[in-house]
Every structure is written in C-alpha cells, then in structure tokens.
Image (tube, helix red, strand yellow):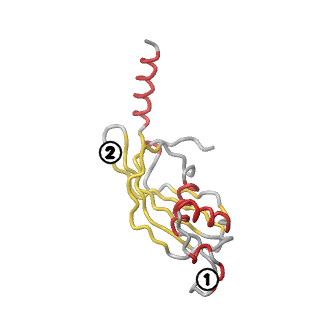
Amino acid sequence: MNETLYLEDLHKGDHWVSPSRTITRDQVIGFADLTGDHDPLHVDEDFARKSAFRKPIAHGLLGLSIMAGLSSNHPQVHTIAFTDLEDWQFKHPIFFGDTVHVETEIIAIQPHGRRAGKVTWFRQLINQSGLVVQQGSLVTIVAAKTATKVRRKATEAHESV
C-alpha cells in the first residue's frame, strides 16, 4: 500500500495512474441487483443487441463507482470528505470485458480552514483501447499534517491522564 499523503504533500499538476480492472457481466448484474436498476440495456443481451450499442453496457454509475475504487489508493490521501462532483461526463459506453484504469491530476488546491484544504481532482476513466469513457472533476477535503499532529497530541494527552 502507498504512503498516505496529506495536503502539504500535494501540488497542482501532480499526476497518478491507477491499476487496471476488467468489468465483467457478473459485476454489472451485481450492480443492477444492488441498485435495483435492471434496465434491459444493462442486463438483457437480446434487448441490447437491438440497441445502438449492439450489446449490453455497464451502468454509467458503475463506471463512476469503479473510478472511485481504483483511485482511492492512487494516490492514498488522508481524505476528510468528498464534497463535489463537477461536470462528470459519460463519453462512451463500457462493455462487458472492458479493462479500465484511472488517470488523476490535481487541478486546484485551496485552503479550507486551518487544518485542511480543498483539492480538485480531474479524473479520466480510460479503457484498454485508450478511449476516455468517463471524465470530470471532483473535490475533496484533505487533512493537513498539522491537524493530524494536533489530534495525535490531544489523544496522547487524554490517554496519559
């Protein structure tokens, strides 16, 4: 696992690439069961064959969820909260058997109180052919190292009483 990064470790323009993951039919069916979204475009091969895509496609929100999972440790950051999803675009379908990865770049960092900052990340979900299937920006609140030190000292003081 990667070292956890804090606000002070991050810089505009920093870039990461996640490992890849292959999307399976079973994962799409499981997502449909979990969410209750059994749209035939995702789960019915006969129906999907008659669609513009000619075969079933993964749910767009499954792609977004996989993006979140793949990028959660690339980089591993001391995140306090996920606050915004900005201009997320579903550019191309994700098909069963597609292998995707995430490319991440920091596009902005702003102070947020005395112990954290707002980080804006631009992320692209890219398939095995190099095609960007989804992209957009998201904002998280990231802890500063000083906040961790303050909390640790307060905890140690409390435990020694």
Q: Which mark is residue 39?
A: none
Other-residue count near label 1 (Cα within 10 Å), few / some / many at <14 / 14–19 / ≥20: some
Q: Secondary structure at mark 1?
A: helix
**Which residue is rendered at x = 40% and y = 33% of the image?**
147
Identify the amino acid type marked 1.
Phe
Left or right: 88 in relation to 95: left
Q: Nearer the viewer, mark 2 or mark 1?
A: 1
Other-residue count near label 2 (Cα within 10 Å), few / some / many at <14 / 14–19 / ≥20: some
Residue 129: image location, x then y, percent: 64, 74
| Callout 2 touching callout 1 (CB < 8 Å) | no
Q: Where's the C terminus, which quadrant?
A: top left
**Which residue is rendered at x = 54% and y = 76% of the image?**
92
Q: Where's the N terminus, which quadrant?
A: top right
Total numbered circles: 2
**Which residue is rendered at x = 60% and y = 44% of the image?**
2
Sequence-wise, which precedes: disc 2 or disc 1? 1
Residue 96: image location, x then y, percent: 66, 72
Q: Which one is nearer the viewer's eye here, 35 or 60?
A: 35
Q: Which one is nearer the viewer's eye here, 39 or 87?
A: 39
Up the image or down, 7 lies above or below 21; here it is above
Residue 58: image location, x then y, percent: 59, 70
Identify the amino acid type marked 2.
His
Residue 125: image location, x then y, percent: 55, 66
Q: Which one is nearer the viewer's eye here, 85 or 142?
A: 85
**Which residue is rendered at x = 58% and y = 62% of the image?**
33
Read off the residue under disc 2. Answer: 112
Q: Which mark is residue 47?
A: 1
Q: Secondary structure at mark 2?
A: loop
Residue furthest left as drawn: 113
Up the image or down, 119 lies above or below 127; here it is above
